[in-house]
Amino acid sequence: MVWQRNVIIKTSEEIEIMRQAGHINALVHETVRNLIQPGITTAELDAVAEQVIRDHGGAPTFKGYPGPYPFPATLTISINEALVHGIPGKKRLQSGDLVSIDCGTTYKGFVADSAISVGVGEIPKKARRLLEVTEKALQIGISKMQAGNRVGDISAAIQEYVESHGYSVPREYTGHGVGRQMHEAPQVPNFGSAGRGLVLRPGITLAIEPMLLAGAYKTRVLPDQWTVVSADGSLTAHFEHTVAVTENGPQILTILDESYRLNSKRLV
Ligand code: MG
Ligand code: MG
């Protein structure tokens, strides 16, 4: 396929910038996670997220992102049956909700993209189990990001693990290459066949993002034209990291880096 020839290999200097973007993105997630509690609105979380990004010299990648209409916020916040692309607003979080927060930061021309899912207050056991399996699916996908492996090895490993727990993955929404653009080649589906697809090599940077539905894999889009929900109303969860393939295995770029935190001047 043509798009497989358009994969953009990053230099180590470019990956270092993406690591800085990823640090800012991780700071957003840490900050927002600490604010999540019953009663807070999703718009309040969004405002804090934008401030964290701008305080560190970044720009919110999602804001204005092209779609049915430009995405209006810094975060996508997707609650319970909402899988991805929920729009922050006046809605207040309630105890028992399962909320997925996705964020992108553009810093010095490069993008970091990552997502977490969090329970609000006390959540049911079935929600905790879905969270655990989704986060583990992300780790399993990342572990397949070895030079010489193929994209299909990532996809198949995620699908096999998820389906072995009785959950499903959407067909319409996938992981992706990431770099100067949030969405670059290749697509990284959460389903597929091992041994197929692009061969991974050092300098490839991917957003790995298992999205899980507790029920069937079908989704639909709400009338706001952005929010994707499970078609059967089942609970969903989403975790994501931006990860580089290196000679020494996969390196997660969207984690807190204490050396940046201690010397924040490196980031502005
Ligand atoms: Mg994302
Ligand atoms: Mg993504």
Image (spheres, grey):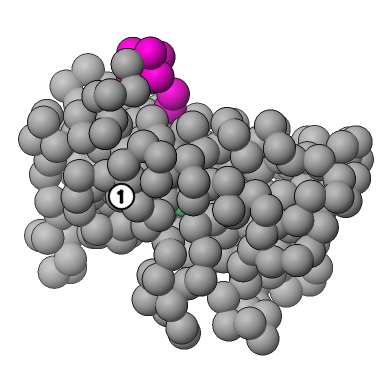
Would you name the residue on which mark 1 appears? 106
Relative vertical location of residue 178 with respect to residue 88 in this rendering, above or below: above
Quadrant location of residue 239? top right
Q: Amino acid at mark 1?
A: Thr
Number of numbered discs on residues: 1
Residue in the picture at 13% in, 69% down? 2
Quadrant location of residue 165? top right
Circle 1 packing at 10 Å, graded few (<14), some (14-19), many (20+), is many
Q: Is residue 262 left or right of residue 115?
A: left
Q: Is residue 133 left or right of residue 19?
A: right
Q: Which residues are magenta?
A: 255-262
Residue in the picture at 8% in, 35% down? 11
State the residue in front, 154 or 221: 221
Any part of residue 38 in sight: yes
Relative vertical location of residue 20 with respect to residue 80 in this rendering, above or below: above
The magenta stretch spans residue 231: no
Quadrant location of residue 1? bottom left
Q: Position of residue 180 (x, y in %)?
A: 20, 53
Secondary element at tag 1: strand
Q: Position of residue 233 (x, y in %)?
A: 80, 68
Residue in the picture at 51% in, 71% down? 72
Q: Position of residue 18 (x, y in %)?
A: 26, 37
The rendered magenta stretch, by its main secondary structure, is classed as helix
Q: Is residue 15 left or right of residue 111?
A: left
Q: Position of residue 240 (x, y in %)?
A: 49, 43
